[in-house]
Amino acid sequence: NAGVTQTPKFQVLKTGQSMTLQCAQDMNHNSMYWYRQDPGMGLRLIYYSASEGTTDKGEVPNGYNVSRLNKREFSLRLESAAPSQTSVYFCASRLDRAVYGYTFGSGTRLTVV
Amino acid sequence: ILNVEQSPQSLHVQEGDSTNFTCSFPSSNFYALHWYRWETAKSPEALFVMTLNGDEKKKGRISATLNTKEGYSYLYIKGSQPEDSATYLCALSGTYKYIFGTGTRLKVLA
């Protein structure tokens, strides 16, 4: 099925550990995004990539790195996880015009202890 | 920094009631306004996109209107059902970036 595939669905990390969240889309979208969702905060943009080979910071980039490996894949890396990064992470993609909506992945629930 | 405000934050309605909620945004820098439906433990799903002042969209019992001059959009649900329980997000979009509101959490009581 066409869409955005995000892995893993759940993860528990110890403080200081690192991990990479994977995201892939097969809709030929140029733009890809990583959001985090926290209670009462809505969706906050971490990083986005407007096209293969480019990445830009969003609202809350500190503590994260991203890689746009190719047009399909956009990964999010936590180099040294902190409890403040406990959240639900969503990857999304869309076409590059304002009228187009996002297609979201199913989310990753990350807990840092 | 653009701010997208949604109200109320949450509401409970009885099955069969009609309800509506508001998304407010700066009337300048407008490109498109999106509504999403977000069920618990799932990912947001697109409902509507509107671009023109006066736009109205409808999908079944759910409809939305847009006023870009005064900077607001309304989402209406007619005859609410328990399966309508979800968070309804609006978002203001440009070419690459969205600004999301914090959502209205709707609970429909059977």
Image (tube, coloured by chain):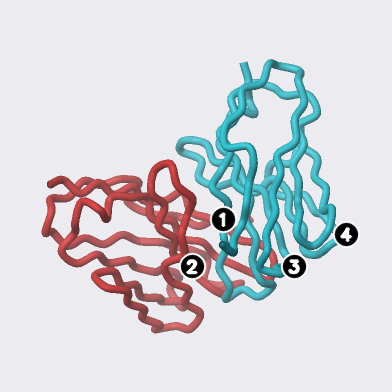
Chain colours: A cyan, B red
B17 to the left or right of B54: left
Q: Which mark is residue A104?
A: 1
Residue at (75, 59) in percent of width and height? A72
Q: Are marks 2 and 3 in contact (CB under 8 Å)?
A: no
Disc 4 vs disc 2: which is toward the camera? 4
Lower position in the chain sequence, tag 1 or tag 4: 4
**Chain for mark 1?**
A
Q: Amino acid at mark 1?
A: Phe
Front in this rendered view, residue A106 or B97: A106
Quadrant of the image for the N terminus of chain B? bottom right
**Chain for mark 4?**
A
Q: CA distance from mark 1 to mark 2?
A: 14 Å
For mark 2, does the 10 Å Cα neighbourhood hold few (<14), some (14 to 19), or many (20 or more) residues?
many
Q: CA distance from mark 2 to mark 3?
A: 19 Å
Specify the quadrant of the image occupied by residue A11: top right
Q: What residue does disc 2 label?
A: B34
